[in-house]
Amino acid sequence: MSGEIANPKIPLLYLAFANHQDHPLENLVTESREVYRLLHPRAQEGHYQLHREDFAELDTIAHYLATCKDQVRLFHFGGHASSQSLLLRDLEARSAGIAAMLKQQQHLALVFLNGCSTKGQVVYLLELGVPAVIATSAPVNGGLASRFAVQFYQALVRAHAFQAAFDMASAYLQARGHAGIHFFRGIVTPKNAQMDAQHWGLYALDETALRWTLPDQPLNLLDMMDPAPLAAAAIAALTPYLVKGGEELAQGIGKDLWELVKSRSKAMRIRRNWKSSRLSRRTTDTRQSGRKTGGPPGRGYGFGR
């Protein structure tokens, strides 16, 4: 298991791989490793959190979907599957139940079912309001499934939307000369989702769903915090030292203190970015001269590392 969920406010990408001891998929290990490798750098930058399971079980999936309420933006499954089920490590899970659990994630943008003949599950998910689903309509070779997933996420982490990432992954397999593979991408409804698709299909409820991209900015948690507790603490600490009528002044100080916290937090982020770029630009001449590199304007105390 990789990438423990550290913060309940940051969006989460959930990767569930289910290798089975009786029916192992050799390429599933590669898919898990490469997809995680592609997504991990931006998770480190704070754009989202990344959670991966290599031996997914029903109780584990249920636990994290319940624990991470409304955090999951993307759910990826890789492993044995059918039109009605996902073969997890411990049992064959009914797809209608998995879909019902995913329904509880209010900000879910995509479900990617990278297993054989999962197109029958599209109807469940679209009916429950999942904006976009990637699924297959026929048995697929494990190696092709892994390559398709890796190419899709490689495009996604480079700011391509779902639609463009799907098209690039499709073009990659076609360029490799895999004959007889066809793709579908478009807007569908639960009623017509059973139409004849090809090997991989991207099914979306509307154009907005096709244009979704990964979060590309770190979340500023201070913007999501309630300033009232900090202001109240400032008032409580300052009021005994103020003359009559000073409570109004203390309230103003509490608000100013909150703005100071936010500005110093931003300053520390800028300072860390500046230090990284400064280190990369140091030259041998500067080191030999013995001069100390200066700091950025506005250096001072702040909050954070």
Image: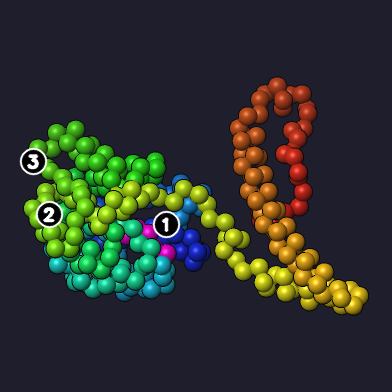
Q: Say few, some or many: other residues with alpha carbon within 10 Å of mark 2 (under 14 / 14 to 19 / 20 or more).
A: many
Q: Please tell me the numbered disc located at residue 137.
A: 2
x, y percent for residue 106 = 37, 67
Residue bounds of the magenta highlight:
71-76
Q: Residue at x 23, y 37 (%)?
A: 172
Q: Which residue is mark 1?
A: 50
Which residue is outermost to the top?
285
- Say if the magenta span includes residue 265: no
Marks 3/1: CA distance?
34 Å
Residue under label 3: 180
Amino acid type at mark 1: Leu
For marks 3 and 2, the one nearer the N-term is 2
Disc 3 residue type (three-letter): Gly
The amino acid sitting under disc 2 is Ser
* Residue at position x 30%, y 72% in the image: 101
Find out whether the residues at labels 3 and 2 contact each other: C-beta distance under 8 Å.
no
Tag 1 secondary structure: strand
From the top left corner, tell me how far across and down residue 243 is, in percent: 91, 75
